[in-house]
Image (cartoon, grey):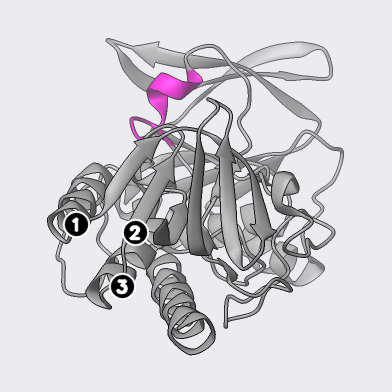
Amino acid sequence: MYDIIVVGGGPAGMTAALYGLRNGKSVLVIEKSGFGGQITHSPKVETYPGTLSMSGNEFADKMLDQILAQGAEIEFENVVSVDSEDGRKVVRTEEGSTFESKAVVLATGVKHRMLGLEGEEELVGEGISFCAVCDGDFYTGKTVCMAGGGNSALQEAILLSEKCSEVIILQDLPFLTGEPSLQKVLAAKSNVRCLTEVKITKLLKQDGEFCGVEIEQKGEKQTVACDGLFVAIGLIPENDAFAALADLNTYGYFDSDEQCTTKTPGIYVAGDCRRKGVRQLTTAVADGATAALAACRYINETLN
């Protein structure tokens, strides 16, 4: 039996593992695909304190090396259920494995909702981005498109308008759905224009590099040249399998506050998978530390 099982190998999950290990606990991290989570989509990370610049993959690799050096064990499997049985946590995977621990940290992350276009996955980090704070500087003085018209998209567009020569908002509805105050800010900017009732039909490349999008508007197709495409059409949490242990809000996120606790003793949540106002690398690692320390306290005070 492990002291702590961490479900998810993103920044929150790996930080939880690190803090658990540094507190003398045995830790297993179960990740279904690849370590690093959403941050691996960023070619450069320049907002992490103490680090001038690094790629998301470099950050993930360093974190993985760090927790392995501290004694973490890892498994590449897909967790499908966690049960609390007689004071122990039983974690089961799609592959048929069963693991037991005293506490569990759920750091399941989120998926960015994609456009569903051919070649999209290959262009993530190479022309397609999801975070203006992370990647906006790479497009200083350039033209970018923003797919989406909700609050997140408009907030991203405002940030991009301070750096880019032009920001083109592409909204599939006849109107923007973001807050009127955000729309007012954008309307006052001479380098921002909005195309509504637009469907992005194709991603364009020239000499292997992203160069724009093909759109369809009222039955007519046209090409919009741009240097980058930011996508803000929603996030998808994958928490349903754990709803019996931790309450979910109406959007499917774990309904937990900054303490990262749940309704089930010994079960904690961390990172983008939980309800929060800011989803950044720094807030993810902060959650990981908070959840792990809470798990350690639970083990020390309740089970020992």
Q: Position of residue 163 (x, y in %)?
A: 38, 58
Q: Amino acid at mark 2?
A: Val
Q: Which residues are magenta?
A: 120-128
Q: In the drawing, what numbered circle is on residue 19? A: 3
- In the orientation shown, which residue stands out farthest toward the bottom? 301
Q: Residue at x 46, y 23 (%)?
A: 121
**In front of the other: label 1 or label 3?**
1
Left or right placement of residue 190 versus residue 304 in this view: right
Within-10-Å neighbours for mark 2: few <14, some 14–19, many 20+: many
Determine contact: label 2, label 1, CB under 8 Å. Answer: yes
Quadrant location of the N terminus? bottom left
- Tell me which corner region of the image, top left, top right, bottom left or bottom right, holds residue 125: top left
Residues 291 and 300: in front is 300
Q: Nearer the viewer, residue 71 or 116?
A: 71
Q: Nearer the viewer, residue 26 or 202?
A: 26
The CA distance from mark 1 to mark 3 is 12 Å
Q: Position of residue 53 (x, y in %)?
A: 16, 58
Considering only order in the chain, which callout, 2 or 3, is on the residue closer to the N terminus?
Answer: 3
Q: Secondary structure at mark 2?
A: strand
**Residue picked out by circle 1:** 71
